[in-house]
Image (cartoon, rainbow, N blue to C red):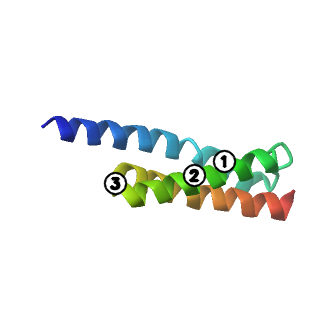
Amino acid sequence: MEEQWVTAIGLFAAACTTIAFFPQFWRAWKTKSTKDLSLSTFMIFWIGVLAWLAYGLLINNLPMILANSITILLGTGILILKFKYG
């Protein structure tokens, strides 16, 4: 039973941190503007998320895998918009 609570907390935390990226992606998509985003900061963050995804896969941790997979997709979208709209 305790392991289920730990997984539930992990899934909740993963959902919060992943969903937090959606407003930025949506705003960049709608406004076609990313000039206020720091490319270097976002690249470092993206690499970190990729590393967390790899770690989650290596330890077979579902919350880490789900959250970081979705965050990588959103982050990649934001990076594409950043390169496209500068």
Return the mark for residue 30. none
Q: Residue at x 70, y 56 (%)?
A: 78
Q: Secondary structure at mark 3?
A: helix
Q: Amino acid at mark 1?
A: Phe
* CB-based contact (under 8 Å), mark 2 and mark 1: yes
* Looking at the image, residue 82 lies above or below residue 35: below
Q: Nearer the viewer, residue 20 or 27?
A: 20
Q: From the viewer's perspective, tell me whether residue 22 is left or right of residue 68.
A: right
Cα separation, mark 2 vs mark 3, equals 15 Å
- Identify the residue at the far left of this view: 1
Q: From the viewer's perspective, tell me whether residue 9 is left or right of residue 68.
A: left
Cα separation, mark 2 vs mark 1, equals 6 Å
Q: Secondary structure at mark 1?
A: helix
Crowding near pointer 2: few (<14 within 10 Å), some, many (20+)?
many
Q: Amino acid at mark 2?
A: Val
* Looking at the image, residue 84 lies above or below residue 5: below
Q: Residue at x 82, y 65 (%)?
A: 84
Q: Amino acid at mark 3?
A: Leu
The residue carrying mark 1 is 45
Q: Residue at x 37, y 49 (%)?
A: 63
Quarter occupied by residue 60: bottom left
Q: Position of residue 54 (x, y in %)?
A: 49, 59
The residue carrying mark 2 is 49
Crowding near pointer 3: few (<14 within 10 Å), some, many (20+)?
some
Cα separation, mark 1 vs mark 3, equals 21 Å
Q: From the viewer's perspective, tell me whether residue 58 is left or right of residue 81.
A: left
Quarter occupied by residue 59: bottom left
The residue carrying mark 3 is 62
